[in-house]
Amino acid sequence: MTTNRTETSVTTSAYAPAANRAVVGTRQGLVQILQYDSGALSTTQQVTEPGAMIDAVAIAPDGQEVVYSFTRGDTSGVKRWEVGQAEAQAVVATENRPFQFFAYTQDGKQLVGGIS
């Protein structure tokens, strides 16, 4: 995948079919929303975790919220990003836990996460 003419390594991804949106996370700390419309894929929004690797992502069924896990050195964390906001917010109860999997329920009201 190429973003802003810089090579990136995708480490995780998730798809919300009803919203025609996907989210990808990269080794370089980038979390991107991709929109699929009229046969074309485009980047709509992104946030970054400088110096971090994105370990896991999930996107709500309506495509309006993303949760992701990241690792930066010896520190791990989870953030919740309301699509449309400039920054993601830390999920405090998950600080320094290396989550590897997330999934939203079909109605988007609950989120499940897995750690090692």
Image (tube, rainbow, N blue to C red):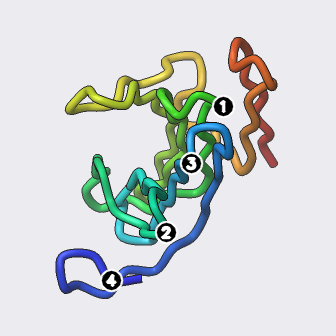
Disc 1 on helix, strand or loop? Answer: loop
Using residue 18 as the reference point, say whether residue 10 is left or right of it. Answer: left
Tag 3 residue:
20
- The percent coordinates of residue 55 (x first, y second) are 58, 57
Q: Secondary structure at mark 2?
A: loop
Residue 108, position as x, y percentages in the image: 69, 20
User: Rounded to the nearest whole Å, what is the CA distance between mark 1 and mark 4?
Assistant: 26 Å
Which of discs 3 and 2 lies nearer the camera? The answer is 2
Q: Which residue is mark 1?
A: 61
**Closest to the observer, 41 or 86:** 41
| Residue under the point 18% across and 76% down | 4
Residue 47 or residue 28, whichever sits in front: 47
Please rate how many residues cluster around mark 4, counting C-alpha atoms within 10 Å: few if below 14, some from 14 to 19, many from 20. few
Q: Quadrant of residue 6?
A: bottom left
Which residue lies under the disc numbered 2? 39
N-terminal of the pair, mark 1 or mark 2, is 2
Residue bearing the label numbered 4:
2
